[in-house]
């Protein structure tokens, strides 16, 4: 049986930070953890980087949700004070309000101290794919102006190269003539055997609509797409594209929760 950390015991060393105050014991527990428990460990570990008085970008998704919950709990306890949150989606905005986290926006705080968010893929250079939850545009707007961007994942999100999971790389587009835009995107990556699909709502088969009123085209690659910066620039060069889910050279710290505990990697 794998040795891993109980989700209540989130420390991996000497902890004197705010998030460490939620721990009841520093000792590991010999249990096998679910994926959601691993996400919780990563989320809580990230909050150790949060200090009172910070402006914090609040991520979106199942992993980031745990970090937002932790910040709310520490504010309620008085361990953290004077925190201002900038949410990356309507869903996170509603979550933060329910936790009484004070909120603001980029107009008021054009520079953010710290952002915490998950990722769908992470390559060895800490390049990311994000946006399978549909919030890539707001996430990128907030995280690109953050002094520190802490990425939290479970070990299933690690890939050898971007696109290596075989899952979607999202591109947010305007609804107008979306089929044309999808065809252009698919043609752009024909050498990678790309398939471009409109994201739909499974229960209704209607297009998924982002918080910004746009559609998402999910790109599926069978081969490595090569130069990521060139790929990102080429995507943005297609009329109708709003933003893509390649987050390159943005992450400063990566926290990975796995069956053997938590690892923290800082950008060289």
Image (cartoon, rainbow, N blue to C red):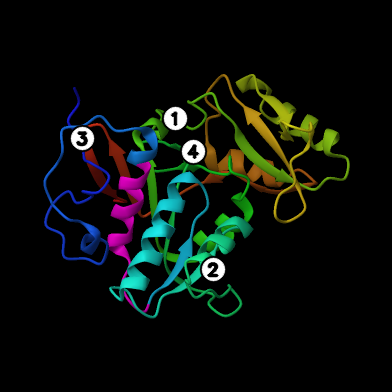
Residue at x 25%, y 67% (from the top left corner): 18
The image position of residue 110, as x and y in percent, is 54, 75
Q: Quadrant of residue 203?
A: top right
Q: How much space separates mark 2 and mark 3, taking CA atoms?
A: 33 Å
Going from N to C along the chain, the mark reached first, 1 or 3, is 3
Residue 215, visible in the rendered structure: yes
- Main SS of the magenta part reads helix
Which label sits on residue 120?
A: 4
Q: Quadrant of residue 217?
A: top right
Residue at x 34%, y 34% (from the top left corner): 155
Whether tag 3 and tag 4 are in contact, CB under 8 A, the answer is no
Q: Which residue is mark 3?
A: 4
Going from N to C along the chain, the mark reached first, 1 or 2, is 2
Q: Is residue 41 magenta?
A: yes
Camera-near label (2 vs 3) is 2
The image position of residue 188, as x and y in percent, is 70, 30
Residue 144, visible in the rendered structure: no
Image mark count: 4
């Amino acid at each position: 049986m794998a040795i891993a950390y109980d989700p209540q015991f989130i420390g991996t060393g000497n902890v004197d930070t705010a998030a460490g105050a939620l721990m009841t014991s520093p000792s590991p527990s010999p249990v096998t953890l679910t994926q959601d428990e691993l996400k919780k460990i990563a989320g809580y570990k990230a909050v150790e980087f949060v200090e009172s008085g910070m402006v914090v970008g609040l991520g979106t998704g199942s992993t980031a949700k745990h970090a937002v919950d932790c910040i709310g709990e520490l504010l309620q306890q008085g361990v953290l004070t004077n925190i201002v949150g900038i949410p990356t989606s309507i869903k996170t905005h509603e979550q933060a309000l329910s936790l009484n986290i004070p909120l603001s926006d980029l107009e008021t705080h054009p520079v953010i101290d710290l952002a915490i968010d998950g990722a769908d893929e992470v390559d060895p250079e800490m390049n990311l794919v994000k946006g399978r939850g549909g919030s890539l545009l707001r996430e990128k707007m907030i995280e690109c102006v953050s002094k520190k961007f802490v990425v939290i994942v479970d070990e299933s999100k690690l890939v050898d190269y971007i696109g290596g999971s075989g899952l979607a790389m999202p591109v947010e587009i305007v609804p107008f003539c979306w089929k044309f835009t999808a065809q252009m995107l698919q043609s752009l990556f024909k050498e990678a055997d790309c398939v471009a699909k409109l994201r739909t709502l499974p229960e209704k088969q209607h297009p998924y609509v982002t918080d910004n009123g746009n559609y998402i085209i999910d790109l599926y690659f069978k081969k490595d797409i090569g130069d990521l910066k060139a790929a990102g620039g080429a995507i943005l060069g297609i009329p109708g594209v709003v933003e893509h889910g390649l987050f390159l050279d943005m992450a400063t710290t990566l926290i990975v929760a796995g069956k053997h505990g938590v690892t923290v990697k800082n950008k060289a």
